Image (tube, rainbow, N blue to C red):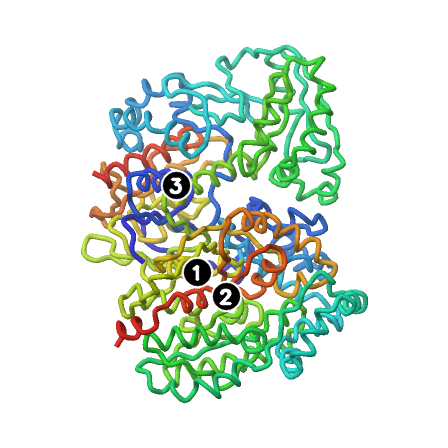
Amino acid sequence: MSKKAKIKNFNVSENDFEQCVKCTVCTVYCPVVAVNPDFAGPKQSGPDGERLRLTDPKFYDESLKWCMNCKRCEVACPANVKIGDIIQSARIKYNKKPPSLRDVLLANTDFVGTMASAFAPIVNRTVALKPVRQLMDGVLKIDHHRIFPQYSGMKFETWFKKYAEKDQDNYKHHVSYFHGCYVNYNYPDLGKDLVKLMNAVGYGVHLLAKEKCCGVALISNGLIKQAKRGAKLNVESFRKSIVEDKRPVISTSSTCIFTIRDEYPHLLKIDNSAIRDQSELAVRFLFRLVDEEKIKLAFKKDYKARVAYHTPCHMEKLGWSIYSISLLKMIPGIDFVRLDSQCCGIAGTYGFKRENYPTSQAVGDPLFRQIEESNVDFVATDCETCKWQIEMSTSRKVKNPISVLAEALDVEATIALNQ
Amino acid sequence: MKFDTIIIGGGLSGLICGIRLAEQGKKCAIITMGQSALHFFSGSFDLLGHADGKEVTSPLAVIPTLPAVHPYARMGIEAIKNQLKEVKPLLMRAGIKVHGAHETNHYRLTPIGVMKPTWLSLDDFTRFDNPTELPWKKIAVLNLAGFLDFHAQFIADGLTKLGAECTLAAFSLEELESIRRNPSEMRSSNIAKVFENEKTRAKLIEKIKAYTETSDCIVFPSVFGLFSPHAMEDFRAQIQKPLCLISAIPPSVSGIRTQLMLRQRFQELGGTYMLGDTVKEGVMEGDKVHHLLTHNHGDIKMQATTFVLSTGSFFSHGLVADPYSIFEPIFGLDVEGPCDDNRQKWYDEQLFNKQPYLAFGVSTDSNFKAKKDGLVIDNLYVSGSVLGGCDPLKESCGAGVSILTSLQIADEIVH
């Protein structure tokens, strides 16, 4: 018998939807279908529906909006069908309804972030007020249970330019950092932790020439043209860093990096082949260096914490939680608890919408219970929206693995080891 | 990333191999493309149910007569006897309770109401020792209204042929109405999630009690215990009459649970389970596999001392057929089968006849080491249904081959 396929599969589409054998395994692992019967489930909304939609677009069904785009169906599929992509592509192609004011506001993390940061103390206090939350619920249909992330008075970029930038050229190796909206507007400390960690192992950190929101919220809210504009700009900035300056790009948000690597080509049809392989999460970048014995990490002897790791859906899809887990386990003082990999329910802006709130909380419920029972000091995870959801729904604080590493790191000893 | 052993494929065979190795202190990883064929599990593990078209009563008496290409023949009867002793305790340690014995097959009632010989059945299911006689006279075959994956009439017909008087009934529950609104997704796994709730189960039991007075046995679809056997055991205890659960059309609730429990056991032993990844390439160094490259891990090498290929058959893409050949897609290993490259000979147009393509598989030496271009790859073993030489459907031997070859390989790796 011959060794390899001699012909290409001419009858296989980009999303592999012809490979679906109707086994329903995807539906078993769909977090939404279990709690919301209005969602027809990944098989019916994805490959089954696609067959119909291809014959006549009128078969497009509004219920596709219930899909959280968690991609757990794709991870489960034994035939590699890109079920989540089929559903999201159908929403892009067939949904003609313009997004509501609320959806536009939620999706524009960049614009809203810039405005809110400028007036951070006022904005933080105002959106935390109960009457304001009730008003947002009534007028904008943003669920009143939701607590908005705090805006930081000083953006990460401002901090970086003021305090960190001038030293970065002194290092032997270099990376660029895609900080994303969350680090820039809400939580610059994570960016500071990354700079501390990378500097300690001998890497200078640089900002990209230009950076736009990755666009995940624009895509899920149907603002495709705007998402494409941002994506093109990002790909060009990444290209300049990776190809011209020979600086790989790292990020601390699993969703941002997943969007840039996979959603750009699959959903926005933007070619990122020149940059994809060298655009990754900081934990993966660090893991590779440790694995290849190119760097060493030294940790504080007195650091002690019981930590549970939560696998965000996009991290599950990337298959990269092993990097975060392996790095956390390298810290001698960590008592590690592995949580089952299951969706927290927020799915970015999805859980902020009033109509999705009950689904969102029902999806996350088994995870919340597991966290409460785990008796940990805090939870570690690579996604900022998972952090908001878990902090709102449990009694535990949530930290990015990069922050945990930075807080446990013996900086002096690490610098000495990597000279 | 470095491991002692990397197993490609996370179904029954890969997990059994991984558990056996991890129990003996090996650092293992399983890389698997998606969920496995256990999602289609009947609820019973077959050892050898048929040979030459005849039903087998004592598998151990028939195994020595199998042709030399059969995985059991490659293993040898002594090795099979040794490994058979290990199976029940291993499953038990993973929390999977089974009944049955390898000395004599028992019978299970299939979803179309016929009796089939088998080896081990999960505790969910009823064991029949005699395929022509039922222990009950009056049987109530019950279903949930709107559940299309359980064919009560087929089962009642089968039971009637065996001399039973059957009553058929279906009833609805308020708690199931919401999933019933979406009939195409009213599947056993979704129903099982509803029955995780004790109060909902109690309501169901109340409904069933109307039939327990007038029947000797209740037949019901297997829709309990997706994550643990608890819901099934609780239901069984409360019915207070013989309860005969029957697998519905996949996804199989008992199979999903078996998969989860095996994976749980593997991970508790320190194993790394990487779901949703595809091995792109096996990179060789001399006559050995040095590392694997995968879709998710890109340039990060997955290194190990030994590798096990447990990728399954055509359904799981362990074997691929194109118009010209049947091939093994990761390493391009030698594939052998009962006929040549002429596609016309691979199948019989009568669906229920013996299908030659099912007997294709990767060539190995007697220790299940893979062959490529006629040469043995020293650190690559092959287990489960990617092995050829048997017809798991016609012989009812799929689970036995998956489990026993894996255990044999694990022992080979450890010693």
**Mark 3: which amino acid?**
Leu
The C terminus of chain B lies in quadrant: top left
Q: Quadrant of residue B138?
A: top right
Return the residue at label 1. Answer: A320
Is mark 2 in CB contact (under 8 Å) with mark 3? no
- Spatial CA distance of label 2 from label 3 is 29 Å
- Specify which label sits upstream in the sequence, 2 or 1: 2
- Residue at the location (57% across, 61% down)? A386
Callout 3: few (<14), some (14-19), or many (20+) C-alpha neighbours within 10 Å? Answer: many
Give me the chain letter of mark 3.
B
Query: In the picture provided, is B8 more to the left or to the right than B250?
Result: left
How packed mark 2 is, by other alpha carbons closer than 10 Å (few <14, some 14-19, many 20 or more), is: many
Name the residue beneath numbered marker 3.
B15
Question: Label 2 lies in what chain?
Answer: A
> Which quarter of the rendered picture does the N terminus of chain B lie within?
bottom left
CB under 8 Å between callouts 1 and 3? no
Q: Which residue position holds label 2?
A: A254
Residue at image position (69%, 49%) is: A36
SS at circle 2: helix
